[in-house]
């Protein structure tokens, strides 16, 4: 931060008291949070001799004012000009820092990284600056790199820095530590929007760590403490979801129904989705379908719409209406051909076809998925089901070729995939390969895969693994091992 007042001490002998007072008054308004008034005062100061001398510092402050007023584009425009004008001056690294923070606020994460991490390295004294560390920590948080985020935020001192430290701790599975940080904000910054939001996300810290009882209590406490907050209805939604997780479906539905007329379409769409699930779990399939149809088709631009399609298809299956479930999943496939849900509809369609013993149709659907969505995170699951279809059709040689080819590919580079998800489906792919090798009488390779799977310890497939390995040992005349 530029200490304008200190600079005035040294130049006071060169300029009039009126000029100095103008900037002092602007600084006072700035520190009192009266940013619009401060801008007007700074702009007046720019017309004086002192203002012309301190032009860069004053524009820096005006840029800060616009940032604090939420006018990020105006702030960005000012700091981009300052970047050009302040090169090789003492204010230049401060401008780089400010640009990084503005780009963070605008969601321009590549540019935020450029200024906060790459450019700032040119100024060694800034590498350990607490403000820079906080900015870097917030950047890492937005990229879901939570360990690095915490490392940068652990000594945070600003309200925003402490807030993101709490958010990071909650993502690292430390909700109680997160609550301490959010409480700190409420003590240090009472009666501010930040304190209000910290109270709200206290419930979120418990919610994302699956402590639904704790989350429920904290959301209820938030409503009691901040009854006029615009976040109250969002807290009610979370209470409804918590109650649903805790098995209190009827009370959950009461909360969710109260939100169906809300002006925020995103909240309404989510409320219809969770309300539909609650009704389904209560056994009211007809009404559940009505809720899920609204969530899926009345709000197509809302992120919950594809989830509503999936839950709608699941509900049709529970009622025994396979054909309507197929139509729903095909609609999901045709509607969401890009993004994180691409290929999901094809996979779910293939799953129903497979269960209905329509193997060739299922294979066709899976082959299309693999061809048109080669980066989809559902690809490993699609290959597992494809191999299962081939084995059931006695095309075990082709199953082995396709499975081995996929194992050699870089599965971990698929879109949105993480290690645990990849390992889960790689294990299932190996199970299919083991079965295919067994059918081809290649007991050595079948045994190899089965034994690898025992070492993986995946409980969901272990019964099949032991059964398959037992038969391999039996046919290899390793009777003691087979009995074991």
Image (cartoon, helix red, strand yellow):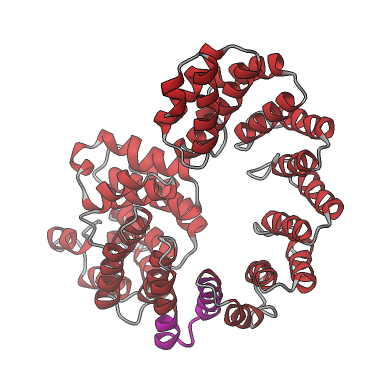
Residue at 40 percent of width and 38 percent of height: 114
- The magenta region covers 220-243
Query: Can residue 147 be seen by looking at this rendering?
Result: yes
Judged by its main secondary structure, the magenta piece is helix
Q: Is residue 232 magenta?
A: yes
In the picture, measured across the screen, residue 90 lies left or right of residue 105, that is: left
Q: Quadrant of the C terminus?
A: top left
Q: Quadrant of the N terminus?
A: bottom left
User: Is 166 or 15 nearer to us in this picture?
Assistant: 166
**Residue 218 location (% of width, % of height):** 39, 77
441 sits to left or right of 320: left
Q: Residue at x 41, y 69 (%)?
A: 201
Q: Find residue 266 and report its horizontal and vertical position in percent.
A: 64, 67
In the rendered image of this protein, does residue 140 appear above or below residue 49? above
Answer with the quarter of the image where residue 439 lies.
top right
Of residues 445 and 463, the one drawn nearer to the viewer in this rendering: 463
The residue lying at 77 percent from left, 74 percent from top is 287
Q: Nearer the viewer, residue 169 or 149?
A: 169
Instruction: Give the number of callouts.
Output: 0
For the point 51% across and 42% down, the residue is 460
């Amino acid at each position: 931060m530029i200490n304008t007042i200190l600079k005035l001490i040294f130049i006071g002998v060169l300029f009039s008291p009126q000029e100095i007072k103008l900037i002092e008054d602007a600084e006072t308004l700035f520190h009192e949070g009266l940013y619009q008034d401060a801008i007007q005062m700074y702009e007046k100061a720019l017309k004086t001799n002192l203002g012309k001398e301190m032009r860069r510092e004053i524009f820096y402050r005006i840029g800060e004012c616009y940032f604090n007023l939420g006018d990020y584009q105006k702030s960005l425009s000012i700091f981009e000009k300052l970047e050009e004008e302040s090169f090789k001056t003492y204010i230049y690294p401060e401008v780089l820092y400010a640009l990084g923070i503005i780009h963070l606020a605008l969601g321009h994460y590549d540019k935020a990284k450029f200024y906060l991490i790459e450019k700032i390295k040119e100024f060694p004294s800034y590498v350990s600056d607490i403000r820079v560390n906080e900015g870097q920590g917030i950047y890492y948080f937005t990229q879901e790199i939570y360990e690095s985020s915490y490392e940068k935020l652990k000594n945070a001192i600003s309200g925003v820095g402490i807030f993101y430290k709490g958010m990071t701790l909650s993502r690292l599975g430390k909700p109680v530590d997160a609550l301490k940080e959010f409480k700190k904000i409420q003590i240090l910054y009472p009666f501010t929007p930040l304190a209000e939001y910290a109270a709200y996300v206290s419930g979120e810290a418990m919610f994302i760590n699956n402590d639904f009882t704790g989350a429920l209590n904290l959301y209820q406490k938030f409503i009691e403490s901040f009854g006029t907050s615009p976040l109250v209805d969002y807290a009610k939604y979370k209470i409804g979801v918590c109650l649903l997780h805790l098995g209190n479906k009827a009370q959950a539905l009461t909360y969710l129904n109260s939100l169906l007329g809300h002006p925020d379409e995103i909240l309404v769409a989510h409320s219809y989705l969770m309300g539909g699930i609650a009704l389904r779990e209560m056994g009211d399939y007809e009404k559940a379908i009505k809720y899920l149809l609204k969530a899926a088709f009345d709000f197509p631009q809302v992120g919950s719409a594809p989830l509503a399609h999936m839950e709608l298809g699941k509900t049709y299956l529970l009622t025994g209406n396979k054909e309507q479930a197929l139509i729903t999943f095909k609609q999901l496939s045709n509607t969401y051909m890009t993004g994180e849900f691409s290929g999901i509809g094809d996979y779910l369609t293939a799953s129903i076809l497979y269960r209905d013993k329509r193997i060739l149709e299922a294979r066709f659907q899976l082959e299309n998925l693999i061809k048109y969505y080669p980066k989809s995170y559902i690809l490993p699951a699609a290959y597992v089901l494809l191999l299962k279809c081939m084995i059931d059709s006695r095309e075990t040689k082709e199953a082995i070729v396709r499975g081995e080819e996929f194992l050699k590919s870089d599965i971990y580079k698929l879109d949105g995939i993480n290690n645990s998800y990849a390992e889960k489906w790689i294990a299932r792919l190996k199970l299919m390969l083991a079965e295919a090798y067994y059918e081809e009488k290649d007991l050595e390779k079948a045994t190899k895969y089965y034994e690898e799977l025992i070492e993986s310890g995946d409980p969901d497939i272990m019964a099949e693994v032991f059964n398959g390995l037992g038969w391999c040992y039996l046919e290899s005349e390793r009777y003691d091992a087979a009995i074991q």
